[in-house]
Image: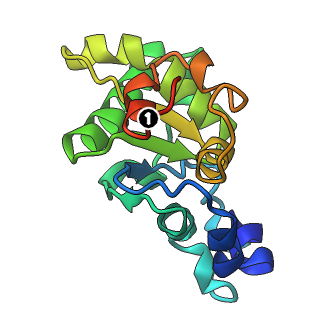
Amino acid sequence: MWAIIEDIGIDALKAKVTRPLTGFKIAPFYGCYVVRPSSALDCDEHPERKGSLERVSEAVGAEVVDFAGKTACCGFPILTINQNASLTMVANHTGEAKDKGAMAMVTPCPLCHLNLDGYQPQASKIRKQPIDLPILHFPQMLGLAMGIDPKKLRLNKHFVSTGKLLSTMALAP
């Protein structure tokens, strides 16, 4: 994320977009590992790092849906010792993003992707209603915008179906 903004540049990224994600309402999810420890992030020296996921999402044409939990823990670190708490975190984050109008969530963290996608069906039971919010890994979002086939991006292998999301682009999951 930071390499795209700091080394490549937003304009260069926009030039690579062949299939803008226009109409996609995407909730950014940093998770806790990407933003901590804050002392190591050099945000004073690199202010562009704050909001970087939002900036890249907008650069590929998506509309950002902001929500309170975007920098909170996804629950993965406690999954094996307190599954109920972990599932509650998944339910809270995905549920809030969905309630605010998100069609999908994007995360640069592979552990967040695993937890938010893989455990969302169980988290729905805690919330007592379906959530059904596709979770995109950051490179998948970029790949979609750059015209890569969704099957090559393995979007057909998610736990939470990406079918409805892809149908808005007239693409098969």
33 vs 24, left or right, is: right
The quadrant where residue 114 appears: top right
Is residue 77 in view?
no
Amino acid found under the numbered disc labelled 1? Ala
**Relative vertical location of residue 147 with respect to residue 117 in this rendering, above or below:** below
Q: Residue furthest right?
A: 7
Q: In x, y percent, where is residue 138? A: 62, 47
Q: Residue at x 33, y 23 (%)?
A: 132
For this rendering, which residue is in front, 156 or 26? 156
Residue positioned 51% across, 61% down in the render: 57
* 44 is higher (above) or lower (below) than 7: below
Q: x, y percentage for residue 128?
A: 19, 14
Question: SS at mark 1?
Answer: loop
Q: Nearer the viewer, residue 49 or 84?
A: 49
Mark 1 sits on what residue? 170
Crowding around mark 1 (Cα neighbors within 10 Å: few <14, some 14 to 19, many 20+) is few
Residue at (23, 20) in percent of width and height: 127
Q: Quadrant of the N terminus?
A: bottom right
Q: Is residue 52 visible?
A: yes
Q: Nearer the viewer, residue 165 or 57?
A: 165
Question: Residue at the location (45% across, 19% down)?
Answer: 161
Write down the quadrant of residue 22 in the picture.
bottom left
- Where's residue 141, x and y in %? 58, 47
Colouring mode (rainbow / by chain / secondary structure / one colour): rainbow
Q: Position of residue 146 (x, y in %)?
A: 66, 53
Most distant residue in the bottom direction: 45
